[in-house]
Image (cartoon, helix red, strand yellow):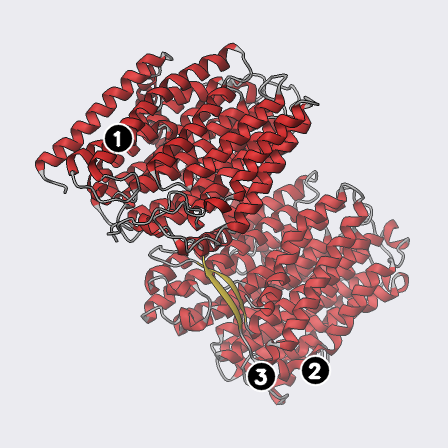
């Protein structure tokens, strides 16, 4: 391999190989693992930066492929595939990951198991980096599962809290449902392309023959993407996942896990036929509205952010569903990156607040923090403005471009996306005003104080990026091969709607008012419906899990116990009895061994002689 | 077809990687005049074996061009084979730091190094007389070292080994004389003039040499000896000595052009019987060391499938894969036999709860067992995969039948390996602390590293095997 290929390998190889070391040094001194973990991810980022500016900007695609297990009917490529899309993801993941881990140095400073935490964070980042650099679907799947594993470990990091333990299980099981689709998609891709489509390069993927076959593979892969990217109906794990440490939520939401699904769709975009894209668009748009509505009635600061993530990922998925080729990828990935910045910013600010408020998460118990924590709240305001798409913050450029792009394409989608923008502004500023304004509504909020500098530095860097990231918009689109945009009249609509949303939020939540209660009471049934998250959790737990799956598993369990076990036990007994019989050959008497050898020798010579006489073999 | 001409001694004068082992034996004897410190002698043994390993790796390709008419020839193939012999041998000599119990460690290490040196000579010999001498040079020191602890079970196992070994020596001599009658030469790869005598002689040679490989009707001594003798010696006998025998047999039978047709059905039957017997009886064993002995019988069955590629285009791939499998086999078998050093009895119950008592050791031992069973991600899987692949690529019905049996047997073997793992991890019981065995841990680590990064090994081996001894390519 060339040096440059080694470098690309090191981007994810270094933290992947280094993570046991991070845990290991923790046994010498716990703080060492914090520094080592941060350093590893930072070096990854530096290497990524070097590779990006030496090769990727020239349009070079760095690949190195090796056939793991040769001579099979299907080749199993493993290796690296670093094109523009991958490298842009790598830069974002390593950079945001580094900032979040840096923040964790302050945030987790007192945790007794922090060496394990940092080891897992490094592994999480490494698996995500490996995921975006994988050259084959199979290798991508391996890292995909590693990401799932890390999310399980980290969400359940405070495993002694029953909520955290069950949330970790939920995240793992729900994303597993998606993974089943993913692996079925890989199978279908192998089947329909004679094994060529295991590689992720567009030429290899386009060997899948007919439109129908492409649609099937695309929809199966999309099923996997839904699970990881938390789209309807598999979004239910993400609000519960807020039980983990806040920095974990930041990493899951901004840099690593939920973006994996979007990346998968963008990576395999060649095989998404119009039929598949319609499904993608519908799921994206539906998720935006659904999660926007739920976001309005939740009171937990982190859960509000979680629902906002679901809806923002919905925008990315919807952008891909528009089916504009490279332009769609550009729109979606640009939204992904700017979302990574402002969502990491919002989560880290939330982390800073929770750190100050001793983990009180109910926004009804906050208030008046504007004066107590000016830097954190200022950063949060930037994040909130960016999230609502207020010009000139990053979210305005990324999200409004998606909405505008849908205008000429699909008017119903456009209307729903605009409504989604309105909801986003409304719930975001409901959150912000409840926290920042008014009087402190609890003891903890009265005694809040600003956080340590090591926590504020990443927040400030992210705030700067959330503000200025819009500058890169057109450069970004053309870099990924899409069409550039310019701001026109149609862009004013979402921006105006966002301003209206912020206004309503101020009117209802920014000052003392009873409007929310009256609205809630007035809408009655509808409010309860939304408040209970559209009864989706109840549906999944009570109907799907308890009735259908459990019932089925009882039937299968009986089948296994009665029929399969009997079958296997019979064979087991046959083999055991055979062993017990053959064992008698082993008498322990040396002369008998010699006799057995002699008999064997005579028999085999006789056998050879017979072969000779028969003339079968010469 | 290749006729052998020329009577030079080959690169006899350059075999320093082998002579250094004999030198080491004398050093050990010399030192034992002044000190009988066990650690010193084990260190001498390890250092000389390691020096030989380094020299073998460096020497490897130097003598690729030496003519095939030589009785002794070190080539890429034989030096790689010697590497796979030396690695488990180093593990064995390190294991000798605690067993066998003796007050003459100097003599023990000297004997060990002498037998190791003869192993190197045996795999690089291409003349039956040389092969016979080197083979006996391995046998006699190992008879002694098997009995070195002088307790009852060691003496008993040595006697069994010796009786069956003497019997086999007779067979070898008889086979060699028939070979000479048939061909008029003792060089390998000579074309016979009297086919029936030749075939008879070769059939007897299979049994004569096969006893050290412990293939089916000759397995009796092996189980008792592996179980009865001390762990490092079991490890030596079941790894280095076995791999050496395999190499010698490959040299003899893969170059015997007239014999290819008879070789395959005979070895197909032997391979199937060997692995099935080993696995079936291993299932009924409650003693872990005896289970390992049976499993090494089963492994001999897998190893002997390699003879099915004789005279086809798959020989090169088969030889590369047999080298990888031999490497894996040495690591996992040696590692697990030496792991027995840390237990005072080998009853399955004694392994219960090992995970709680020493997690690292339990994990390493489990990795080695999984590797023996052929679990993906370990070198054992890679070796088995390539070996079976190369056999299947000959495309004959016989090859398919044998490989189907081999795969079914691998599945079967998960039962008894898995049972030990089950006891170590999930059974409660024994809570006596167990110390770590670093040889086992290192073997497990290498098994996993090369199990994933196997292509490093593969490309190194295929680089060396470019210069496959021409006679091995036999009928191509």
Q: Is residue A410 left or right of residue B214?
A: right
Which residue is nearer to you in this view: A343 or B184? B184
Residue B177 got which mark? 1
Q: Residues within 10 Å of mark 1 (few under 14, many from 20)?
A: some
Which residue is nearer to you in this view: A196 or B464? B464
Return the residue at label 2. Answer: A471
Q: Earlier in the sequence, mark 2 or mark 3?
A: 2
| Circles 2 and 3 in contact, beta carbons < 8 Å | no
Return the residue at label 3. Answer: A478
Q: Is residue A205 above or below residue A532?
A: below
Q: Is residue B406 left or right of residue B290?
A: left
| Circles 1 and 2 in contact, beta carbons < 8 Å | no
Q: CA distance from mark 1 to mark 3?
A: 82 Å
Q: Residue furthest top?
A: B152
Q: Position of residue A207 (x, y in %)?
A: 36, 70
Q: Chain of mark 1?
A: B
């Amino acid at each position: 391999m060339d040096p440059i290929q080694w470098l690309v390998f090191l981007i994810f190889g270094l933290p992947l190989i280094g993570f046991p070391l991070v845990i290991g040094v923790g046994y010498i001194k716990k703080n060492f693992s914090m520094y080592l973990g941060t350093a590893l991810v930072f070096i990854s980022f530096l290497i990524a930066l070097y590779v990006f500016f030496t090769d990727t900007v020239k349009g070079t695609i760095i690949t190195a492929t090796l056939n793991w297990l040769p001579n099979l009917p299907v080749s199993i490529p493993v290796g690296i595939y670093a094109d523009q899309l991958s490298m842009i993801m790598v830069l974002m993941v390593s950079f945001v990951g580094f900032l979040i881990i840096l923040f964790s140095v302050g945030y987790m400073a007192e945790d007794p198991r922090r060496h394990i935490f940092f080891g897992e964070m490094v592994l999480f980042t490494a698996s995500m980096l490996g995921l975006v650099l994988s050259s084959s679907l199979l290798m991508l799947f391996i890292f995909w599962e590693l990401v799932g594993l890390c999310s399980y470990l980290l969400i359940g990091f405070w495993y002694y809290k029953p909520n955290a333990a069950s949330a970790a299980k939920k995240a793992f099981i729900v994303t597993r449902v998606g993974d089943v689709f993913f692996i079925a998609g890989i199978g279908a891709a192998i089947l329909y392309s004679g094994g060529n489509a295991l590689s992720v390069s567009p030429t290899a993927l386009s060997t899948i023959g007919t439109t129908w076959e492409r649609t099937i593979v695309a929809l199966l892969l999309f099923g996997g993407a839904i699970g990881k990217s938390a789209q309807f109906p598999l979004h239910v794990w993400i609000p519960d996942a807020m039980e983990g440490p806040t920095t974990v939520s930041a990493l899951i939401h901004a840099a690593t896990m939920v973006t994996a699904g979007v990346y998968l769709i963008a990576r395999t975009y060649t095989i998404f036929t119009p039929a598949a894209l319609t499904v993608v668009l519908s799921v994206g748009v539906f998720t935006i509205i659904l999660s926007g509505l739920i976001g309005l009635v939740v009171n937990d600061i982190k859960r509000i952010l979680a629902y906002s993530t679901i809806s923002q990922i919905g925008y990315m998925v919807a952008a891909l569903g528009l089916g504009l080729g490279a332009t769609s990828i550009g729109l979606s990935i640009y939204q992904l990156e700017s979302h990574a910045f402002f969502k990491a910013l919002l989560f880290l600010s939330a982390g800073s607040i929770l750190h100050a408020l001793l983990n009180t998460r109910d926004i009804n118990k906050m208030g008046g923090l504007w004066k107590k924590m000016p830097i954190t709240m200022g950063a949060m305001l930037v994040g909130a403005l960016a999230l609502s798409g207020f010009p000139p913050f990053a979210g305005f450029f990324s999200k409004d471009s998606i909405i505008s792009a849908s205008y000429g394409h699909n008017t119903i989608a456009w209307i729903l996306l605009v409504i989604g923008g309105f909801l986003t502004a409304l719930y975001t500023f409901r959150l912000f005003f409840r926290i920042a304004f008014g009087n402190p509504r609890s003891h903890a909020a009265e005694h809040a104080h600003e956080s340590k500098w090591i926590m504020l530095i990443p927040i400030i860097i992210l705030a700067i990026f959330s503000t200025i990231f819009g500058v890169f918009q057109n450069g970004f689109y053309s870099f990924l091969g899409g069409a550039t945009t310019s701001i026109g009249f149609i862009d004013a609509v979402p921006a105006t709607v966002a301003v209206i949303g912020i206004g309503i939020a101020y009117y209802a939540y920014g000052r003392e008012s009873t409007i929310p209660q009256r609205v809630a009471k007035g809408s009655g049934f509808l409010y309860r419906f939304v408040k209970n998250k559209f009864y989706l959790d109840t549906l999944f737990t009570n109907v799907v899990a308890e009735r259908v799956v459990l019932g089925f598993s009882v039937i299968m369990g009986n089948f296994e116990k009665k029929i399969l076990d009997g079958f296997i036990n019979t064979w087991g007994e046959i083999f055991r009895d055979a062993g017990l019989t053959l064992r008698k050959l082993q008498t322990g008497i040396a002369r008998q061994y010699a006799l057995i050898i002699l008999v064997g020798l005579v028999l085999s010579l006789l056998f050879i002689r017979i072969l000779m006489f028969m003339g079968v073999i010469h | 077809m290749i006729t052998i001409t020329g009577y030079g001694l080959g690169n006899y004068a350059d075999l320093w990687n082998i002579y250094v082992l004999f030198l080491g034996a004398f050093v050990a004897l010399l030192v034992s005049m002044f000190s009988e410190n066990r650690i010193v002698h084990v260190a001498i043994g390890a250092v000389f074996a390691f020096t030989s390993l380094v020299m073998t790796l460096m020497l490897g390709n130097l003598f690729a061009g030496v003519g095939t008419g030589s009785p002794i020839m070190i080539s890429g193939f034989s030096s790689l084979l010697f590497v796979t012999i030396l690695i488990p041998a180093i593990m064995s000599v390190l294991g000798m730091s605690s067993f066998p119990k003796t007050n003459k460690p100097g003599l023990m290490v000297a004997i060990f190094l002498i037998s190791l040196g003869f192993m190197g000579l045996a795999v690089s010999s291409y003349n039956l007389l040389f092969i016979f001498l080197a083979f006996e040079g391995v046998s006699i020191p190992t008879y002694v070292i098997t009995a070195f602890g002088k307790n009852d079970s060691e003496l008993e196992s040595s006697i069994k080994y010796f009786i069956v070994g003497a019997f086999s020596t007779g067979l070898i001599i008889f086979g060699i004389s028939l070979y000479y009658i048939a061909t008029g030469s003792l060089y390998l790869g000579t074309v016979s003039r009297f086919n029936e005598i030749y075939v008879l002689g070769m059939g007897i040679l299979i049994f004569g040499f096969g006893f050290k490989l412990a293939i089916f009707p000759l397995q009796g001594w092996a189980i008792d000896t592996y179980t009865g003798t001390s762990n490092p010696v079991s490890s030596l006998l079941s790894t280095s000595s076995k791999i050496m025998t395999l190499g010698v047999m490959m040299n003899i039978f893969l170059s015997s052009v007239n014999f290819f047709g008879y070789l395959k059905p005979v070895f197909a039957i032997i391979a199937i019987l060997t692995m099935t017997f080993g696995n079936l009886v291993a299932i009924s064993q409650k003693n872990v060391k005896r289970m390992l002995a049976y499993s090494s019988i089963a492994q001999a069955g897998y190893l002997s499938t390699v003879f099915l590629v004789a005279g086809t285009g798959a020989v090169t791939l088969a030889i590369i894969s047999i080298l990888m499998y031999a490497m894996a086999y040495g690591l996992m078998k040696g590692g697990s036999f030496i792991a027995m050093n840390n237990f005072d009895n080998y009853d399955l119950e004694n392994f219960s709860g090992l995970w709680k008592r020493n997690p690292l050791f339990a994990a390493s031992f489990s990795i080695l067992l999984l590797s023996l069973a052929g679990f993906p991600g370990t070198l054992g899987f890679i070796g088995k995969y390539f070996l079976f692949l190369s056999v299947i690529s000959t495309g004959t019905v016989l090859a398919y039948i044998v490989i189907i049996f081999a795969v079914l047997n691998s599945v079967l073997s998960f039962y008894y390996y898995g049972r030990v793992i089950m006891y170590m991890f999930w059974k409660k019981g024994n809570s006596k602390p167990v110390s770590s065995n670093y040889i086992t841990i290192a073997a497990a680590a290498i098994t996993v590293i090369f199990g994933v990064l196997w292509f490093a090994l593969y490309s190194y081996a295929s680089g060396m095997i470019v210069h496959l001894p021409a006679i091995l390519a036999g009928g191509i």
